[in-house]
Amino acid sequence: MDHDETEQSSTDVDALARRIDRPVVLVGMMGTGKSSIGRRLSALLHLPFVDADEAIEQAAQLSISEIFERHGEGAFRDGERRVIARLMDGERKVIATGGGAFINPETRALILAKAITVWLDADIDTLVERTTRKDTRPLLRQGDPREILTRLRDERRPAYAEAPIHVTSGRGPQARTVARVLKEIDAWL
Ligand code: S3P
């Protein structure tokens, strides 16, 4: 296994952390591992971690499924836009966004202007495998999850592709994806 793909010395990471002057925002489809990769990044960089979906749930005092059921997707998207605008306060932190957040043009422009934006991508088999472990995503209950994921991934790709940093999260260890994200941020800054 390639050493620099799997780990990096803490001095390298500390030096990179000092150069990070904005929030790091992870965007991309559900099932790419934004939340778990984000948690690992935040621990390595010694920065706070915020899961935007959890922040929306806290603000609404409802789960995402409940928001969709009781108020509809439009209300969820409104809440998502407001929560992300609030999180873009210039503070250094790592933020995992829900898969649809970056598709809103206003939210996308705000994130691109204020953050270091990383698009995490994965192939369809990986997305299907990772999203079927939990039944917490209302959009995937509307039909065949593989078809929905394939359609959304195709529709959303042009928006995600506006992110300046693109990392594919494969089936290998998450530490490898984390190392790639760090390397790409380092190269981009
Ligand atoms: C959504 C993704 C979910 C969540 C909601 C809608 C989407 O977040 O925000 O179910 O539109 O792709 P994850 O990407 O964290 O699963």
Image (cartoon, rainbow, N blue to C red):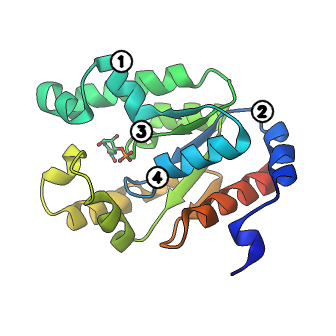
State yes or no: Cβ of the residue under disc 3 lies below 8 Å from any atom of ligand 1. Answer: yes
**Mark 4 crowdedness (10 Å alpha carbons): few <14, some 14-19, many ≥20:** many
Comes first in the chain, label 4 or label 1: 4
Left or right of 185 on screen, residue 178: left
Q: Position of residue 130 (x, y in %)?
A: 34, 62
Comes first in the chain, label 2 or label 1: 2
- Look at the numbered disc 4 and give the secondary structure of its residue: loop
Given the image, on which type of amino acid does mark 3 rest? Ala
How far apart are the two marked residues, 3 and 1, measured between alpha carbons? 16 Å
Q: Position of residue 131 (x, y in %)?
A: 30, 58
Q: Which is closer to the viewer, label 3 or label 2? A: 2
Q: Residue at x 12, y 58 (%)?
A: 143
State yes or no: Cβ of the residue under disc 4 lies below 8 Å from any atom of ligand 1. Answer: yes
Give the residue pinned by disc 2.
21
Quarter-wise, where is residue 109 in the image? top right
Give the residue pinned by disc 3.
101
Give the residue pinned by disc 1.
59
Q: Position of residue 92 (x, y in %)?
A: 69, 29
Name the foreground residue: 95 vs 48.
48
How far apart are the two marked residues, 3 and 2, measured between alpha carbons? 22 Å
Q: Which is closer to the viewer, label 3 or label 1? A: 1
**Residue 28 circle label:** 4
